[in-house]
Image (cartoon, rainbow, N blue to C red):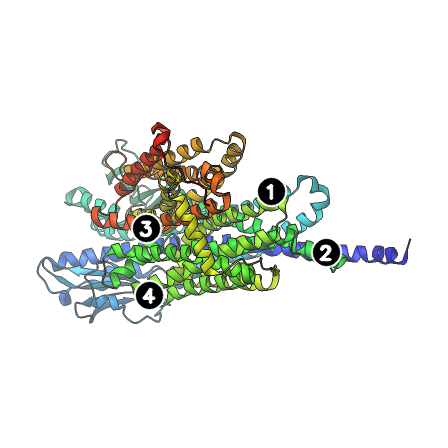
Amino acid sequence: MSVAQAAAASEAPGSNLINRLIEGVTMFVVAAASLFLLLYVGFGDGRRTYESIHIEKITSQGLLVRDSIEKFLRDGLPLKQYAGFTTLVAPLLESDDVDAIAVYNQAGKQLFIGVDRKKPALPEPAEAIRNLDKGIQVDKGPTHYQVVLPLRTRFETAGSVVVMSPASLVSHRMAESFVPLIFLVLGLSAVFAVAIVVAKPYLARLGSRYLQIAYGCTFMAMAVFVVATLVGLYFDGIQGKAKASAFTMAQRLTDIVDFKLSFQDFDGIERTFSDYRKLNPEVSEAAVLFGNKVEITSDRTRKAPTWAPADTNFEYKLPLAREGAADGPSFAITVPKSIIFERVLRSVKNFAALFIASAFLAGLFLQVAGSIQGLRTSDGKAQEKSPVGNDAALVLIKPVFFLSVFLDALTYSFLPKFMQQVAIGSGYSVGFASAPFTAYYLCFALSLIPAGTVCDRRGPKPIIIIGLLIAAASVVGLTLPMGLWGMTALRGLAGIGQGLLIIGVQSYILAVASPEKKTQGAAIIVFGFQGGLISGMALGSLMVNFLQTKGIFAISGGVGAATLIYTLLLVPTSKAAQAQGGFKAAVRKLGNDLKNVVTSLEFLNTLVCIGMPAKAILTGIITFAIPLVLGQAGYRSEDIGQIVMLYGLGVVASSGYVSRLVDRTKNTERILFIGAVASGIGLTLIGLTGTSMLGNGLLSTVVIIFAVSLVGVAHGFINAPVVTHVVQSSLAKSLGVNPVSTAYRFLERGGHVAGPLIVSQLFLVWGQGPQILGGVGIVVAILGIMFVARRLIPTSHRLHAEPAE
């Protein structure tokens, strides 16, 4: 053994240990980031729901006070002469939920107040007491929730009832539930990292599958704990609300029993129970019992005379007699257990979307981490070896395009509505809301040629860096108080940034990919766009609920800044291509190519019937119209994001299969026809939602989910095959593949630009409804039929481009 070999052998164990340690830390960080994201979304969803339940509870208590006072006011008596306020609110102040209940007149002057005997510090009155035209309002202050309920006479608003509840009740309950899960995240991440490092030598034959399986199991285990926590949280909230409402109602009925009166002697008891049900919709039945015999019930369909608990309900009983005899009168309510599980089901749906988004992100960064480690090991063995030109260089560029799409997609679920609000706030009609979207895609298209010219002269890395700077800055700029045209300018800048990025990444891939890796390089663009779109839509639509739009814009800018740092530190510089001519030469060449291709009926048929409509659907329907239509129909932002996310999943699911099918059969025309007609059918189905045929219920939601998924699958039949169809055409054989494909890509961008503009004008003329999308679907399907109908045209009447001299 030589001295060098002996030295290498002696260093190998230490080097191997360091490599394993680095790999373990990397796995821990990636898993912890994913699980903390899951925990954050679970916490945000849980807080929003639990807070909503708590506010509903104190609102129902306030409504009981309001209804009692309004009966007095409707007799024509002045509010300041109301007697018995202290007695009315005393039972409510005995609970921990309410610190004070106050009554204010129309001018905002306090007339009565009842305060908990603990004498808590109370907040300043909410501004809402001076603006009572908006109905019931909730002021969420730093220390208290204040629910403001207007008091109305027969003719006017006389004042308001304000219920003050400490916000600490919600924050303490949330901390009690979720703080232990922080330690669980750290523990599961550590177990995942150790398991991967230890098991790697034994599971190497499985490739990357063992890593995916381990990550999935870890995520699911954490999701189970989060869901279990939410079940307990929602149970406590619903139970607390039901008990509080039952206690308040029982207090109102106790006097009847104490004075030994009969419930049957009172008119309107059934109406009182009906009103109680309206205030507490989670209660399925409320009844007065004598022993187990039902005396009065809110359920008019009840036939059984005796009270029998059901396993599907939670039941609460409170005695009405002060002595509380076992066979004495009592007030009982039932709450279906399904109420809790319906609320949890929404969280589970959100976690499923989050898992898909996290899987894309985690898989990407685990692969990048492995490549960085491989580069470090490679550099240790051979310092002279450059990363440029090897497989690791392709992996290193993946996060750049992925995250550049991701930072923009974070805003897609709410950006159309946001721009509509900006347009209205600027004094324009909602039709102008399409201007920022049109500017984005127009600037995107116009930036491609200059970006390509600069890449040829300076190399791709400077273009990537400039693109990231512009993209990040333009999104952060949306947090500023600007009018419509300022927002339009920012979206135009965002389009320029994204155009520079896609050209820079494509040029980088061409520079570093070996000939046998060109397909892998092209897949980076496909994966980056669809993966970034899916992850961004899922996460943005979830987080906007608790971060609001400005928070999402700020996070998008932060993602852009982090990607910029990553690019500067880890993406190697590649050599510039041999520049042939300048910008004018590139424009002149493109002009000549366009002049040659537009005389081909075959080329125009593909462009007008297939290519441009598909791009217009993406920009005008998927990312612009559907969020607006669904938002108008009452869907939450996370529902909108998850529905649109299905489009990207459909594209990813079908693209691989379709690409292999096209390579095998070479029949692109049939594939494109299927894609066009299927996308038209999908849009037509969306147009049926909200009609008398489907209504606005569960069936309508199922149809929307299926239709958007169908459009995504259909576009998987178009996106790649349409380029293959163009480059295999007779025109490409005569003019050359590159001129024809370049001209097609440029003209195809016209669909991107026209999509939002056309749809917004249709909305302006015929209304912002799903029927517009159905009409577009019919047109798209007809264009698909026209694409194949050209075969019926005699050959002698077709136009063919002659080869350029």
Q: Nearer the viewer, mark 4 or mark 1?
A: 4
Q: Nearer the viewer, residue 15 or 506?
A: 506
The residue tagged 1 is: 213
Instruction: Work out whether residue 211 or residue 178 is closer to the camera in this orientation and state it.
Output: 211
Q: Earlier in the sequence, mark 1 or mark 2?
A: 1
- Dot 2 or dot 3: first in sequence order is 2
Q: What is the C-alpha distance between the residues marked 2 and 3? A: 49 Å
Q: How far across and how far down the image is residue 701, in percent?
A: 34, 39
Which element carries disc 3, helix, strand or loop?
helix
Q: Which mark is residue 486?
A: 4
Residue at mark 2: 377
In the rendered structure, the answer to whether residue 675 lies left or right of residue 62 reads right
Query: Mark 1 or mark 3, which is nearer the start of the sequence?
Result: 1
Q: Is residue 345 above or below residue 248?
A: above
Could you classify mark 4 by the number of other residues whose Cα lies within 10 Å: few (under 14), some (14-19), or many (20 or more)?
some
Please, what is the three-letter code of the amino acid marked with disc 1? Answer: Ile
Which sits earlier in the primary sequence, circle 4 or circle 2?
2
Q: Can you identify the residue that label 3 sits on?
A: 756
Are the residues tagged 4 and 2 within 8 Å (C-beta)? Answer: no
